[in-house]
Structures are given as C-alpha cells and as structure tokens.
Amino acid sequence: MSIRDQLFGYIEDKYKARPEYLWRRFPGYAVFRHADNNKWFAASMDISADKLGIDSSKNVDILNIKVADPVLADLLLQQPGFFRGYHMNKGSWISVLLDGTVPLSDIKGLVEASYNATASRQKKQQNRPPREWIIPANPRYYDIEAAFKGSKEINWKQGAGIKTGDTVYVYVAAPVSAILYKCKVTGTDIPYRYDDGNVYMSALMKIKLLKSYNRDKFTFDTLGSEYGIYAIRGPRGVPRSLSEALNKGRT
C-alpha cells in the first residue's frame, strides 16, 4: 500500500474526514476538511516534480498542510521532502513528498498540527491542553467552605473558557480574601438557570477538591505584592510563578 493510501486511511479513521475530489481536470487532487467550518486541513495532489523545483518531470504525490508556526515551517523547509506550499499560501502552507523521503509518522504529526491550526474556535477550545485558573467565590452568596466539608465534589458556576480537565484555584472573597482550594474540573456545561438579582448562572461545572490551603498562605495582599494580581472578578489565568507556589503549597 502506498504512503498516500496509508495516509488517507489514517485521516479517515482519526479525523472522520473523507477525501473530496473537487476538480474534474485534476482527478488525483483530494482535500480533507473540517465538518463544522468546512476549512481544509490537508490537500493531496499528484504533480510534476519540476513544479517543486526538482530536476525531474515524473509525477509525485504531495500533501499540503498548514504550519501555523513560521519558525517550524522554516526548519522543515531546510529538510529533504519539504517545499513551499504548491498552489497554496506559501507563508503558512507547506508541501510534503509522499514518496518515503519523510517518514509517515512525521507526516501524521504534521497533519494533526494542521488540523488543530485550521479548527474552529470551539474545536480549538476542546482540543487545547489543560489550563489553570483562579475563580472567585463570594461567601455572602454561597458558603463554599461548608460545601466542601459536606462533599469533595460540588457544582459551581460555569466559567467562560474553562473545560473538563482544567484546574481551578478558588479565591474566597472578604472576609477571607485568600485562595483556599485547588480543584479539578470534572464536568462542564451542565444545564442550569439561576438569577436572583445578585448572581446569574446559565450553566454549571463540577469541581473536585484536590487540596486546601491555609488562610494566611495566598492572601489578597500576597497575590498583589508577589504575583501582580490585584483583582479577581471572574476566571483568570494563573501566572507561572504563582502556579509553582500553589503546587508546592501545603494544606
């Protein structure tokens, strides 16, 4: 089986995308696209090798893929089997020979990168690596300390951008004014409607307690003076220095 056929089978199996043959004049050209936004993430062509600058008129199979990182693209183009994208945006697409010059395993990794680079915003959110967040809790409206005494896993207001697998550090507002909990997000987008004039919720997430911190460890003053965090009004990212301290912090 040719590398082209192996690659087609891999793409169909992993990404559930079938090749589309769009041009009668070029029956060997096939594209693969996302189902939700219709963007191409790979395009296979059979072309004359001299169109790539190779001193030959024989036909070769290539795969066009998007490389979002220009530094990586430049590095690849210095290696055998890689060329500026044929009939594509040469600033962000490259062509890869499918003749064995480039190992199939390497091509698969580049297809994944192209798939992620061309994905919709929603799909990118789903596919991104886990992140860490600080989220606020106001004891005037909900006693989270009592909630965690009753259960290690509770429902909480869904934070924008937060997904299952992320880590959240719960900052409890005055009179506590400190980060008290490290939790893992175990579920998101749980349907829920609530509005009492002070708190509005359209969905919940489920968070599981992993660690508790002493009240005097990560106080509001410490967050400001040592980590440059002066306000926590909604979900926000965690600076690396604070992440390191939180992961070393003792209960």
Image: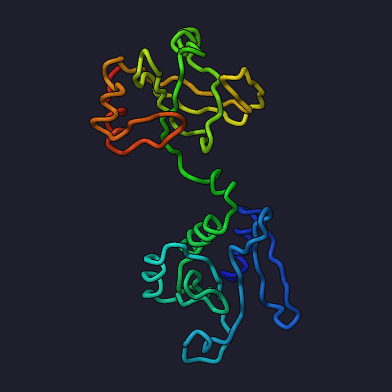
Tell me residue 10's x, y (percent): 60, 58
Tell me residue 223's x, y (percent): 29, 28
Q: Is residue 198 above or below residue 110?
A: above
Q: Quadrant of the N terminus?
A: bottom right
Image-quadrant location for residue 196: top right
Quick one: which residue is furthest to the left in this view?
226
Compared across the picture, whether 67 is left or right of 2 comes to left
Q: Is residue 105 above or below residue 27?
A: above
Q: Is residue 206 above or below residue 56?
A: above
Image-quadrant location for residue 131: top left
Q: Nearer the viewer, residue 79 or 90?
A: 90
Compared across the picture, whether 26 is left or right of 83 comes to right
Tell me residue 180's x, y (percent): 36, 18
Q: Residue at x 46, y 43 (%)?
A: 129
Q: Quadrant of the C terminus?
A: top left
Q: Nearer the viewer, residue 207 or 196?
A: 196
Q: Nearer the viewer, residue 234 or 185?
A: 234
Q: Is residue 214 above or below residue 232?
A: above
